Image: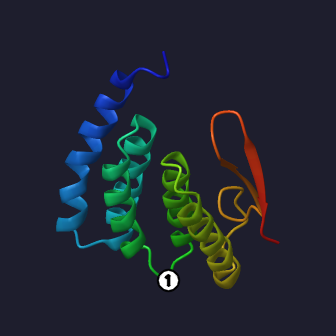
């Protein structure tokens, strides 16, 4: 049931309705939240180009805030799913470094020192940054 692509129809519809409103309100935080939510949904659907599009918009809106590492981590996750492991490693490492620099709230998504990079369907490698 959860893997069904139909479950994403309603959230995408509502986030796409909210997206232009956040722009009209000239609120970078709301715009960034809407963009990151759309990016996460497209990532879950397997539409990685759309996911990166919205996540990069979110990153721009969150620049310098505690929310930027979260978005960087998501971008790294998209690259992992695309099997672009060097890009994934760079984004994930940057997320950790930025979270430390900004003293972001401890969050397992952004403050993790270890994460999986899947080299293929059978092999899983650990990358250790700290």
Measuring 52% from the left and 46% from the top, which residue is drawn there?
81
Name the residue that disc number 1 marks: 64
Q: Residue at x 70, y 60 (%)?
A: 107
Quadrant the C terminus occupies: bottom right
Instruction: Look at 68% across and 71% down and name the residue there.
Output: 96
Residue 76: percent from left, percent from top: 54, 59
For residue 122, side relative to residue 86 (left or right): right
Q: What colour scheme governs how the chains and residues are painted in the rendered image of this protein?
A: rainbow
Residue at x 43%, y 44% (from the top left corner): 43
Q: Is residue 26 above or below residue 21?
A: below
Between 24 and 71, the one lying in front of the other is 71
> Callout 1 environment at 10 Å: few (<14), some (14 to 19), or many (20+)?
few
Left or right: 104, with 33 as reference point: right
Q: Residue furthest top?
A: 1
The picture quadrant where one finds residue 47 is top left
| Rendering quarter of residue 128 | bottom right
Q: Position of residue 89 (x, y in %)?
A: 62, 65
Residue 66 coordinates in the image, percent (x, y): 57, 74
Total residue callouts: 1
Nearer to me, 27 or 122: 122
Left or right: 111, with 71 as reference point: right
The image quadrant that residue 122 belongs to is top right
Out of 94 and 27, give the one closest to the viewer. Answer: 94
Residue 111, x across and y down, in percent: 72, 65
Residue at disc 1, secondary structure? loop
């Amino acid at each position: 049931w959860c893997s069904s692509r139909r479950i994403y129809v309603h959230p995408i519809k509502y986030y796409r309705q909210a997206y232009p409103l956040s722009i009209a309100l000239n609120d970078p935080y709301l715009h960034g939240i809407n963009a990151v939510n759309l990016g996460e949904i497209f990532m879950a659907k397997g539409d990685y180009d759309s996911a990166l599009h919205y996540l990069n918009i979110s990153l721009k809106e969150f620049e310098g805030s505690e929310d930027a590492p979260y978005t960087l981590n998501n971008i790294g996750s998209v690259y992992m799913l695309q099997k672009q492991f060097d890009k994934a490693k760079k984004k994930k490492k940057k997320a950790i470094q930025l979270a430390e620099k900004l003293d972001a709230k401890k969050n397992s998504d952004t403050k993790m020192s270890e994460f999986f990079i899947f080299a293929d369907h059978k092999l899983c490698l650990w990358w250790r940054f700290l």
